């Protein structure tokens, strides 16, 4: 009998340890990350970009507004980096047609920055039609800005 109860105690410890380990294990960043997208209600490419990040595993919530400038000012997006939508995820800003892979990388690396941006509306970027062209993803914040990644369409290059 004692051998059986010893086995049960060990089994309980193992089970409790496994449960605790699963509870404390970090979730994949995309599964844990919800993106709040601020977009104009009349903009189709913003909705297409939201579908792109949703298909990559992010949980997407859309807030429609006709005054994106007020949101960008409140959040601190530099005007020269502005695009057609602004998003918030994991304590960062995402401005414009940033590929989901760049957002995932930012959330994994956690750079000291306010966020990342794809200024303007590059043809072929996620959510945009047209022949894909090259463009940078810019990381920006109080310590300046730099090119974070390079893309052609949704494909990373360089």
Image (tube, rainbow, N blue to C red):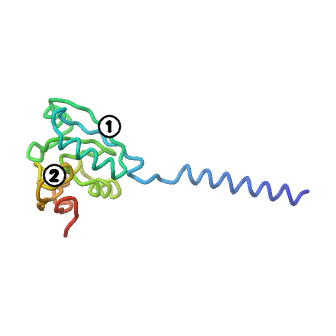
In the image, 71 versus 49, the foreground residue is 49
Q: Residue furthest front?
A: 130
Residue 95: give its label.
none
x and y, in percent, of residue 149 in the image: 20, 62
Residue that appears at 26% across and 44% down: 50
For label 1, the SS is strand
x, y percentage for residue 73?
A: 15, 35
> Left or right of 53: which side holds 40?
left
Residue, far bottom: 158
Q: Position of residue 131 (x, y in %)?
A: 11, 59
Residue at screen point 47% across, 53% down: 26
Nearer to us in this view, 98 or 81: 98
In the rendered structure, are the residues bearing label 2 and label 1 in contact, judged by CB atoms less than 8 Å apart? no
> For the residue carrying disc 2, how many other residues have a C-alpha within 10 Å: few (<14), some (14-19), or many (20+)?
many
Q: x, y percentage for residue 108?
A: 35, 57
The residue under the point 67% across, 51% down is: 16
Pick the front one: 11 or 141: 11
Q: How many marks?
A: 2
Using the rendered view, name the quadrant where residue 100 is placed.
bottom left
Residue occupied by mark 1:
61
Seen in the picture, residue 40 relative to 22 is either above or below; the reply is above
Image quadrant where residue 76 sits: top left
Q: CA distance from mark 2 to mark 1?
A: 20 Å
Circle 2 is placed at which residue position?
118
- Above or below, 70 relative to 149: above
**Which residue is rendered at x = 14% and y = 42% of the image?**
84
Task: Specify the quadrant that holds the C terminus.
Answer: bottom left
Q: Residue pushed farthest top?
A: 66
**Helix, strand or loop at mark 2:** strand
Vertical relation: 95 (above or below) 151? above
């Amino acid at each position: 009998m004692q051998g059986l109860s010893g086995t049960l105690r060990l089994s309980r410890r193992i089970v409790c340890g496994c449960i605790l380990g699963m509870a404390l294990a970090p979730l994949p960043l995309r599964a844990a990350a919800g993106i709040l997208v601020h977009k104009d209600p009349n903009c189709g490419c913003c909705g297409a970009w939201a579908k792109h990040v949703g298909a990559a595993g992010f949980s997407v919530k859309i807030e429609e507004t006709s005054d994106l400038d007020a949101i960008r000012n409140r959040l601190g997006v530099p005007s020269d980096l502005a695009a057609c939508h602004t998003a918030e995820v994991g304590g960062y800003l995402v401005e414009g047609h940033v590929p989901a892979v760049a957002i995932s990388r930012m959330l994994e690396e956690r750079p000291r920055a306010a966020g990342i941006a794809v200024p303007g509306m590059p043809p072929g970027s996620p959510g945009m039609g047209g022949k894909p062209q090259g463009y940078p993803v810019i990381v920006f914040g109080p310590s300046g800005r730099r090119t974070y990644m390079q893309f052609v369409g949704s494909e990373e290059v360089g």
